[in-house]
Image (cartoon, grey):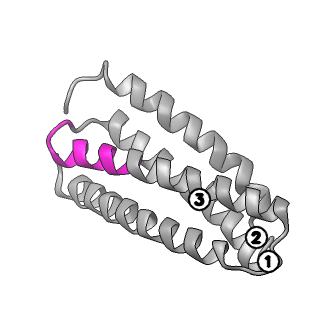
Amino acid sequence: MTSIFRFTAQCMFIFACLTGALSVLVAAYSAHIPGLEEASLRSLQSAIQMMQFHALALLVVAWMFIGGKSSWVLFGSGLFFLTGIVLFSFNIVLHQLAGISLFRPLIPYGGMAFVAAWVVLAISVFRSST
């Protein structure tokens, strides 16, 4: 494994850890917002749940890559997980808590990135290490 891929996998690992921490902070903050509409709260809870679940998945993928099961396919899965977290979860949180709607049209692409990440992860089982 080249050093640039190892470094990128380490960055993915750190990103996953920080995303997990951020999800806890957002959950705690959103639980204490007075007057938050029910629809907004449900949307935030969905984003937090997806953020936590996929941060764990990214953590495992990065760990596998760093631990020696390196392949382009596994690396691609990690990139899809990272993209999904940013485009889906982060955008929903930005929209609901900060009112930033600029990137809202990208949310469906984040969902598609999550699906792609899981499919590519499944494919990685059949790919040999490089």
The numbered disc on residue 48 is 3
Element under label 3?
A: helix
Q: Nearer the viewer, residue 40 or 121?
A: 40
Q: Mark 2 falls on what kind of element?
A: helix
- Quadrant of image for the C terminus: top left
Question: What residue do we see at 78% from left, 62% from top?
Answer: 104
**Residue at 31% in and 23% down:** 125
Earlier sequence position, callout 3 versus callout 2: 3
The disc placed on residue 95 is 2
Quarter location, residue 93: bottom right
User: Above or below — where is 8 with respect to 29?
Assistant: above
- Cα separation, mark 1 vs mark 2, equals 5 Å
User: In this image, 38 relative to 128: left or right?
Assistant: right
Q: Is residue 64 left or right of residue 47?
A: left
Please tell me the numbered disc located at residue 99.
1
**Whether label 1 touches label 2, CB < 8 Å:** yes
User: Bounds of the magenta span?
Assistant: 58-69
- C-alpha distance separating marks 1 and 3: 17 Å
Amino acid type for the residue under numbered disc 2: His
Disc 3 residue type?
Ile
